[in-house]
Amino acid sequence: MADSQNGETKIDIENLRSAFVGMGKEELMKYANDPFWVKMRWFLFILFWLLWFGMLSGAIAIIVLAPKCAAPTPKEWYEQNPIYEINSRDSSNADSIIDLAVFLGMKENIEYFEELGVKTILLDSVLKSKKDNPNFVEDFMSVDPTLGTGDDFKKFLAMLKEKGIRLLMSLVPNYSSDTHMWFEKSVAKEEPYKDYYIWVPAKGKGTDGQPLPPNNWVSVNGGSAWEWNNARGEFYLHQFDKSQPDLNFRNQALIDYFKDVFKYWLDMGVSGFYLDRVEYLIEDASFKNEPINPDTGATHDQYEFYIHKQTTDLPETVHLLKDWGSFVRNHSGLVFSCNFVD
């Protein structure tokens, strides 16, 4: 209640309480026993539990009937553990010491790998090579004599298998040594080796009377990728050293031969192959010039001077790798490179 004289306000609590008092006990009991409200309470009680059990059943049904998450794809054996890389011709590193010249004396090393938990070893090339250099292969189906014999290698693989260790062999199929029997017979134009390498006639002669290369291709090492061979009277391609003539993988016989190479080593006990430098496997068949790289300060005889559209990463290379990969996989092996696994 407001006091008009001094502006004060007075609130009567008792009057407010009487204004908001609910039903009394007697009045409430009258409704509590009313048949209508009794039925209503039972109806709401039953409805509550029906809805509760309905929601529970629905939740269970969703859990049981909902599509399950797909099981994770099992990892391949080569994905389950790190791959331990070994240089077969370098025993200077105590952590990866393997002197393959004494295959049979490797038991302690293999036990060491077992202790480390190594399950896969990547071994660099053990192929017969010129001057004991694995980059100059003279036979893709022979162990280099400085490392041992084929029988030694079999025993080595058997020891690895006993410990549950797989071996991957590193291999560069892009070229051979110029002392390989194939190259010597190809120079002489003997079949079937005549087209095992990439031979192209000179496009003319320079002012000095010397044969001119067919195009502007340069080797990774610098200088022309073409080397003149007097005996054959043509240039041969080498994307690396001139002692490493490029093999011609547009020749189906050569493609099939490498399948025999893969099978030979798989039968011996190798689990697969790491193919190095595969981006150089196939070149443009029309021998077009490479476009110049506008963003380089290199000179015309340096590799960086050009954009290598004609000599690297051609679509045919992928087809070739898939073909080899399918073959090796059908023989329970693995083929992989930096950007390819099959």
Image: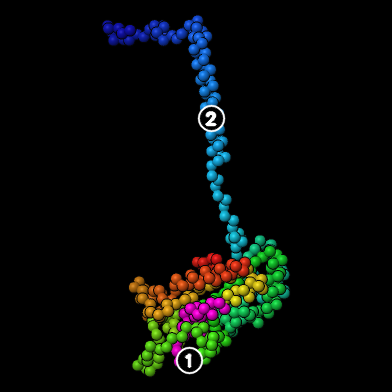
Q: Quadrant of the N terminus?
A: top left
Q: Is residue 167 magenta?
A: no
Q: Give the residue pinned by disc 2.
A: 54
Indicate the position of residue 22 as horizontal and vertical percent values: 45, 9
Q: Mark 1: few, some, or many residues within 10 Å (few <14, many ≥20)?
A: some
Write the residue at 59% across / 60% down: 76
**Which of the two discs, 2 and 1, labels the residue nearer the N terminus?**
2
Residue 325 sits above or below residue 231 on the image? above
Residue 237 sits above or below residue 108 on the image? below
Which residues are the magenta region? 229-257
Q: Give the residue pinned by disc 1.
A: 232
Q: Nearer the viewer, residue 78 or 114?
A: 78
Q: Residue furthest top?
A: 26
Which mark identifies residue 327?
none
Q: Is residue 251 magenta?
A: yes
Element type at mark 2: helix
Write the residue at 48% across / 6% down: 27
Indicate the position of residue 6 as horizontal and vertical percent values: 28, 8
Res 257 quadrant in image: bottom right
Left-right relation of 117 to 29: right
Indicate the position of residue 271 as horizontal and vertical percent values: 63, 68
Q: Amino acid at mark 2?
A: Gly
